[in-house]
Amino acid sequence: MVKMSVLMIVITSSMLMTTSRSVQRARDVDSEDSEIVRRHLLANGLGVTPPMGWNSWNHFSCNINEKVIKETADALVTTGLSKLGYNYMIVGLNLLVTKRYLTCSKTMPGSLGHEEQDAKTFAEWGIDYLKYDNCNTDGSRPTVRYPVMTRALMKSGRPIFHSLCEWGDMHPALWGSPLGNSWRTTIDINDSWLSMLANADMNEFYAEHARPGGWNDPDMLEVGNGGMTKDEYIVHFSIWAISKAPLLLGCDIRNMTKETMEIVANKEVIAINQDSHGVQAKKARMEGDIQIWAGPLSGYRVALLLLNRGPTRLPITAFWDDIEIPPNSIVEARDLWEHKTLKQKFVGNLTATVDSHACKLYVLKPVA
């Protein structure tokens, strides 16, 4: 077996173990505002960029065992995914303790009422990531339960990425930043076009609350599970990338097709997600089935997504004033799925024809 030099993680919980806004405004945050932001983030030094890895739940649910875990760890290494940043492995674990509240599977004990004991155990085991879910509670509010686990993790003596999975019920994007490194903004995703878009839409609503150290989470990736077309999976991965969402693979990576690998291993798209500027993209314009998403990147660049949600092929035009590029700028466009820089330079706008249920993803760079 190939040994992983990356980390093994556990999801365990009281319930489941398991556009841009103004570019200039984002760049001109002064030191006082930066200090305010820091005070409202979980101070564990983690999540500077969105986490990347694999989560067993979407494909395996709780039907996970040592063999699958070891083979998946090997696959992360042998496929090269770990070198691309997919370093977290998130799996369900049975704590072998009875008389507790159960996890979402209703087959495993959770942490509710045992937070300090479990956080200490996680630290002793070398755990690096905790996804704390929201099933089978005692009726207390998430705003009461989650701080208990946060305090327990902070007392454990080990930095552990804290993923709040409250399903967006009480808008955790509004209160989650002092408690976790990411927070679910949506209901559970399923492997379908409509579910994926619904979660993308819900997550986008909270874009201004995402920043380095704390990210909006529209749920795991379904790429490779078979319920969508290749173009739809490209849309899925593209939206998650520009939304600075956690890139957590949810397929069986031991048996990924070449097509799936080409999507999830696209270095240029991953680079948007991991960009140091850390600003989530937003919808800049919507017209019927057409959507234009954009967000600022480091180096005065802009990530641009032209999305066709409809049944027919359509031309889509992005105007500079919609995506906050100065109107007379001459712009170079890099197509991230074609892996080529377009020969034409663009002034004022960019137009592309986009297939049904497909997208075009560019990085725009003003050159004059």
Image: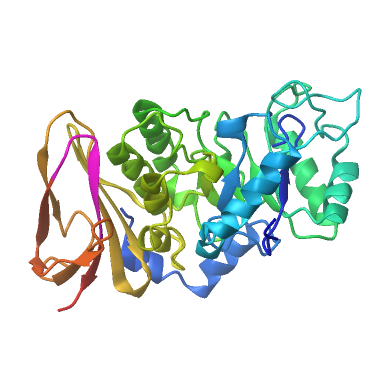
**Residue 158 image-quadrant placement:** bottom right
Dominant secondary structure of the magenta stretch? strand
> As displayed, is residue 229 above or below residue 140?
below
The one of 257 and 8 positioned closer to us in this rendering = 257
Q: In which quarter of the image is residue 192?
A: top left
Q: Position of residue 93 (x, y in %)?
A: 77, 37
Which is more toward the observer, 276 or 9? Answer: 9
Q: Residue furthest front?
A: 1
Q: Report whether 204 appears left or right of 159.
A: left
Q: In this view, does 76 lie to the left or right of 92?
A: left
Residue in view at x 74 percent, y 35 percent: 144
Name the residue nearer the viewer: 274 or 300: 274
Vertical comparison of 111 with 36: above or below: above
The segment highlighted magenta reads 354-362
Q: Where is residue 244 in the image (x, y as percent from the top left)?
A: 45, 53
Count of picture labels: 0
Tell me the quarter of the image containing the C terminus. bottom left
On the question of residue 298 being in view, the answer is yes
Q: Which residue is drawn at 80% across and 51% down?
A: 153
Q: Is residue 145 shown left or right of residue 181? A: right
Q: Residue at x 72, y 55 (%)?
A: 128
The picture places residue 300, in percent across and down from the top left corner, at: 30, 72
Residue furthest toward the bottom?
368
Measuring from the top left, give residue 229's x and y in whole percent. 31, 34
